[in-house]
Structure formats: structure tokens, C-alpha cells
Image (cartoon, rainbow, N blue to C red):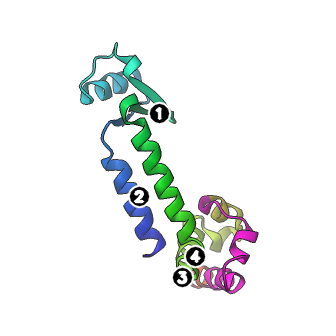
Amino acid sequence: MKYNELKKKNAKELNDFDGIFFAFSNEQFIKGMKKLGLNEDDKDKVCSLGSGGIILKSRSKAFNDMFKRNSSAMEEALKKPDFLLSALSYELANHEYCITYELEDTFDALGLTIDDILSVEGGRDILKQAKESSLQDCF
């Protein structure tokens, strides 16, 4: 599996998760509560995920379990050379490396440090290959 495939799989699982909504206004909050079959006064039955996310308290453990499982799967996959190459290539393009020549945003997006990358078999060559490919794709 490639990096963008795992990202899409995890995003689909999040989007399909039942018992969650996002609200950035009172109107959106009321609409989200109704979607969950609740009245706006049933605030004791939900909790905030932060960043506008609201979840049924009864679904919070399942959500946390899903999040941990997906995070662990990504962490493990990033230790594999082919997956790491696809991840670096994707995020270098996503963060416009060919314009900025900055790696920090790419590393942050992947939750990695240079030491993490170098600890993967062939990590130095993988990073070099991803950078070169990103530059070639840009010009």
C-alpha cells in the first residue's frame, strides 16, 4: 500500500465514523445535534474533540481506538522503505519543496525527524531520491 492510499483509507474511516460532527457556529451545532438524534440541550451526551469536532460520549472510546489504530498503522508503515519513499514524495510535493527547498513542513506532516528517516534501511538514499523526484516533477 502506498502512502496516499493509507491516507485515503484513514480519511474514509474518519468520514464514515458514526456519532461525530463538526460545528463552527451555533447553527451548525444545533444541526449536528439533530443529526445525532439529540436536542441542543443534550450537551451532557456529547464532548468536544477540539477544532470544532463534537462526538457522542458513548462513541468516544471507539473513536480513540480507531485513531490509535490508524496512527500505529501509519507509524509502522513509515518504517518500510517503499512506503517511506511514497510518503516523502507525496508530502514534498504537497508542501511545494521544489519552490521552498524546505523539509520541515514535510517532516512535520509525517510526524518524523531526520533521525527517524535515517533509521530506515536506505533512509538517506530514499530522502535523496524523493527530493530529486520532487524537483524533476516541478520543472
Looking at the rendering, the stretch of residues picked out in magenta corresponds to: 109-132
Q: Which amino acid, by three-letter code, is at mark 2?
A: Asn
Q: Secondary structure at mark 2?
A: helix
The image position of residue 80, as x and y in percent, is 57, 78
Q: Which amino acid, by three-letter code, is at mark 3?
A: Asp
Furthest-right residue in this view: 115
| Residue 122, above or below 26 | below
Which residue position is annotated with label 3? 82
Q: Quadrant of the N terminus?
A: bottom left
Kindly report the distance in space between the C-alpha atoms of the residues bearing marks 3 and 1.
35 Å
Q: Return the residue nearer the eye: 96 or 107.
A: 107
**Mark in front: 4 vs 1:** 4
Magenta residue check for 124: yes
Disc marking residue 84: 4
Are the residues at dot 1 and dot 2 in contact (C-beta closer than 8 Å)? no
Look at 57% across and 64% down and name the residue there.
75
Kindly report the distance in space between the C-alpha atoms of the residues bearing marks 1 and 2.
19 Å
Q: Earlier in the sequence, mark 3 or mark 1?
A: 1
The image position of residue 112, as x and y in percent, is 67, 64
Kindly report the distance in space between the C-alpha atoms of the residues bearing marks 4 and 2.
17 Å
Q: Secondary structure at mark 4?
A: helix
Disc marking residue 10: 2
